[in-house]
Amino acid sequence: MKQYQIAVLEGDGIGPEIIREGVKVLRAAAEIGGISLGLNYYPYGAEHYLKTGEILPDAAIREFRDSNAIYFGAAGDPQVAPGILEVGLILKIRFDLDQYINLRPIKLYPNVWTPLKTEAPIDFYVIRENAEDFYNGMGAIFRSNGQRDQTHHCEMSMKRVPYQINMTLDSRMDASDDYAVAMGVITRQGAERAMRYSFELARAKGKKKVTAVDKVNVLPHVYGLWREVFAEVARDYPEIETENSFADATAMWFVKNPENYGVVVMPNLFGDVITDLGAEITGGLGFAAGGNINPKGVSMFEPIHGSAPKYKGLNVINPVATILSGGMLLENIGEQALGELVERAVTEVLREGRVRTKDMGGTSTTSDMGDAIAAKVRELGRS
Ligand code: IPM
Ligand code: MN
């Protein structure tokens, strides 16, 4: 029997509830596939931090490296200042494990409400570059009184940037006003691996077009290099159509003609913003799954939504995003057929339309949805 070790981080707020349903479905799939999933739970998140002051020890990262994948719920709590868990927990995992691809499918499932006028099917992929751009956190606030608060939170990205550029943040001129600087970094290697992954995904999923998003009209340096590398990588994939699109226009086209997309590759920060929009045109955050992927390392799967603290413990949140992320996890560890089975089960339960959570205008609970999808996995898997 094939055995896999999965690190599970439920996190905060609704995290434990959605992970419970995700695990239910993973277990059903494992049973059908005759595989064994060893689930190793970790306590990290707001509660653990408030109790112990610890965010995520390096020892945990070492254990994650020995796992086949990470399954993550959601982190964040109003009692913890913004940024602490985002940087110390989520970004730390993404950066330390070099999960440089953030794969976010944008798909409208049957019977799911969209605010769009279009009747056309929506089914494409966003690849958000996940290790560079403005997410390295390099920057500083310079106060006119001489004080300076300087940060960065991605060693890897810092190392790729020549020392002198880092030092420009140190050599400030006297200023009469406070000012702040953030430095976005795109490297050739960083852009290239995101572009290649996008073209390979287009090939694998039969998508005809790859669109690269930027804002080269305003930031010609970072996004100039991004666009240059896109054109170069595209030459290796002559059968795939390519397109460049500005970030602002992309937001507009997502609403106007989402059916025109195949694979869309975006720098980190635009990708963060625009994938929330992508979620909303396909039923909301309750349906938006994602994976932080290192194709040669350990990847982490999580819904793109947050911990929704005000719904904690109410059993009303839609677990589909987490369940679909679990399906992506199975595909990632090499259980392609089981990943597809989970997605088919979700599609079928939504098509039948009997189980509808609060966000879908229904009264079904988080566990009703998990139960129905797990049962469907067994039903489809046996037939
Ligand atoms: C996301 C989240 C994260 C991000 C935060 C929590 C660090 O918004 O996964 O989209 O900005 O990437
Ligand atoms: Mn986000």
Image (cartoon, rainbow, N blue to C red):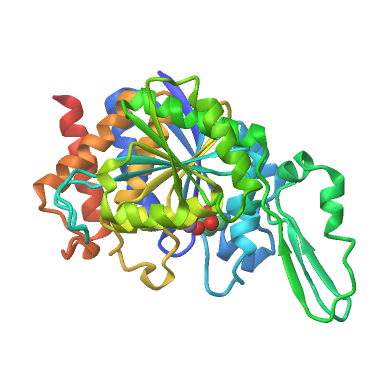
Inspect this view and state whether residue 93 appears. Answer: no
Give x and y (percent) for residue 326: 38, 40
Screen quadrant of the N terminus: top left
Give x and y (percent) for residue 289: 37, 47
Residue at x 25%, y 31% (from the top left corner):
341
When the figure is inspected, residue 160 is found, relative to residue 66, above or below; the finding is below
Q: In this image, 155 relative to 288: left or right? A: right
Q: Quadrant of residue 145?
A: bottom right
Screen quadrant of the C terminus: top left
Q: In this image, 146 relative to 2: left or right? A: right
Quick one: 3 or 75, which is closer to the camera? Answer: 75
Residue at x 68%, y 47% (from the top left corner):
185
Q: In this image, 347 relative to 216: left or right? A: left
Quick one: 205 or 70, which is closer to the camera? Answer: 205
Q: Quadrant of residue 26?
A: top left
Residue at x 65%, y 56% (from the top left corner):
88
Give x and y (percent) for residue 252: 35, 57
Quick one: 104 or 117, which is closer to the camera? Answer: 117
Total marks placed = 0
Q: In this image, 89 relative to 378: left or right? A: right
Residue at x 84%, y 80% (from the top left corner):
144
Give x and y (percent) for residue 200: 44, 25
